[in-house]
Every structure is written in C-alpha cells, then in structure tokens.
Image (cartoon, rainbow, N blue to C red):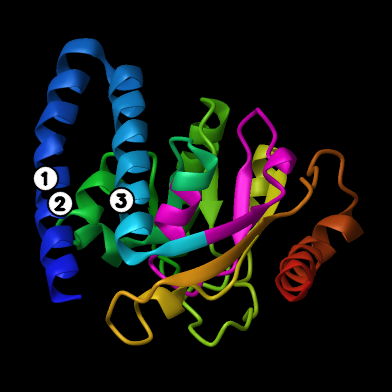
Amino acid sequence: MFFKKICYGFYMLWIRIKGYKFWYIKKTKGEPAAIEYLKKVGYLWSKFTMDIIGIDLEVTGLENIPKEACVFIGNHSSILDIPILLYKTDRALGFISKKEILKTPIIGYWLRNSKCVPIDRENPRAAIESINKAIKNINEGYSMVIFPEGTRNKEGKVGPFKKGSLRLATKSKAPIVPVSIDRASRAFEDTRTFVPTKIKVVFGKAVETKNLSKEEEANLADNIRNIIITNLNN
C-alpha cells in the first residue's frame, strides 16, 4: 500500500509537469486545443487513479447522456467523484466547486485552467457572477457538474440540496443528467488508504429544463434529488 502511494505521488508530480505543455498549447494553438489536451490528461489521470486504487466501476445509464452540453447533478461523498465522472463521461467537464479546492497544489492547478467555476455562497453577487460564467461555458459547448449538497457526505446519504443550486440548469435551459455514485469514500477517505472497492454509478435519464412551469421549476431540486436517491437504492 505504501508503494502504491509513492507511485501515485510521483504520477501526480508528472501530471503537474504536463501543465507546462498545456500552457504551451494554449499559447501557440489556442484555448480549444488546450482544452482538448486537458481532457486527455484528465482521462488518463482518472484511469490511473481507478487502476492503482483497484476501483471496479459498475456503470449503468451512459446512453442517457445527451450529446449536447448538459449539467451533471450528483450526490457527493468523495474527492474520487471527480475522476469517476471524468473517466466515464470522457468529456472536458467544468465543475462548480468551493473556491478552496482551487488552492490545492495539483488538482487545483488543472481545475483553475479548466472550465471549473469557483463559487462563494457567502457572497451573493459573486455567486451570481459564477453562475453566469458557468452558463457561458454551457453555451460554448462544455458540460458542467454540480454537487448540490455543498459538502461531501461520507455516510452515503444524500443531504438536502443548497437553495438555488439548480439555477445553472434552469437559466441555461440545459438538460440535467442525475448522477448517483455509491459512496466512493470507501475507496480512500474513510480509512485514508487505498481500498479496492466496487462502486456503482448510475446516470439517470436526462431531465429537460426548457419550458418548465413555475411549479415544475420550484419542485425540480426535490425531483432530481429523489431520482438520485432512487437510483442509489435500486
């Protein structure tokens, strides 16, 4: 186990070094080419993470992911939720995240240079600006990811969604894909060691946000949360 952690540490340093190539591509070939390179780096990092820990993903519902940009909304138990989504969707995803995670040395670097949008829920004006930036990303063809609980829940339960957490989807009119991830914290955070684990991931049927009535929009968060819970328990 110690050897695996050492290997992973060296791999993460290598991933950080790849940031120089990302910067060079962005400078010489433009942002679209750089984002495509970022997508490749994200996929390879995610695959390496799954392999070295020994995570066996049992995935259903990939056919429910629309080809166009969408908003993935899921429960959140682990930092591993990020590589799981990058690995299985194989897209250049943008994450709505706490601003603190952008300060982490390596993952934070790549999130800062991706379509990730930090959000400060204690500053309403800044939060609105963040949502508008995320909408711009969707309009440019990039899918976004939100964990509406606002924090990780290692117990495997789905907590209440933060007020206004689905505003990105309703304002952008992008389809929502509910994502259920069965307590990925078991593979690392619970014990702080790599634990080979079988993790169920369910991509629910896409929910359209166009032409919602006021009542449907008011109930949307509860409906998406119920879908996530139902898919976790099936």
Looking at the image, is mark 1 or mark 3 earlier in the sequence? 1
Quarter of the figure with the C terminus: bottom right
Looking at numbered disc 2 in the image, what kind of residue is underneath it? Tyr
Please, what secondary structure does the residue beneath circle 2 have? helix
Q: Disc 1 marks which residue? A: 14
- Name the spot of residue 122 as percent of width and height, x first: 42, 72
Could you tell me if the residues under marks 2 and 1 are in contact, i.e. CB atoms within 8 Å? yes
In the displayed structure image, the side of residue 110 where residue 51 appears, left or right: right
Could you tell me if the residues under marks 2 and 3 are in contact, i.e. CB atoms within 8 Å? yes
Of 189 and 31, the residue lying toward us: 189
**Image mark for residue 48:** 3
Magenta-drawn stretch contains 227? no
- Name the spot of residue 165 as percent of width and height, x first: 60, 62
Looking at numbered disc 1 in the image, what kind of residue is underneath it? Trp
| Disc 1 versus disc 3: nearer the observer | 3
Quarter of the figure with the N terminus: bottom left
**Image mark for residue 11:** 2
CA distance for labels 1 and 3: 12 Å
Tell me which residue sits at (62%, 83%) in the image. 157
Tell me which residue sits at (53%, 69%) in the image. 198
* Mark 3 Cα-neighbour bin, 10 Å: few <14, some 14–19, many ≥20: some
Task: Give, as a single range, the part of the protein colored magenta.
Answer: 57-86
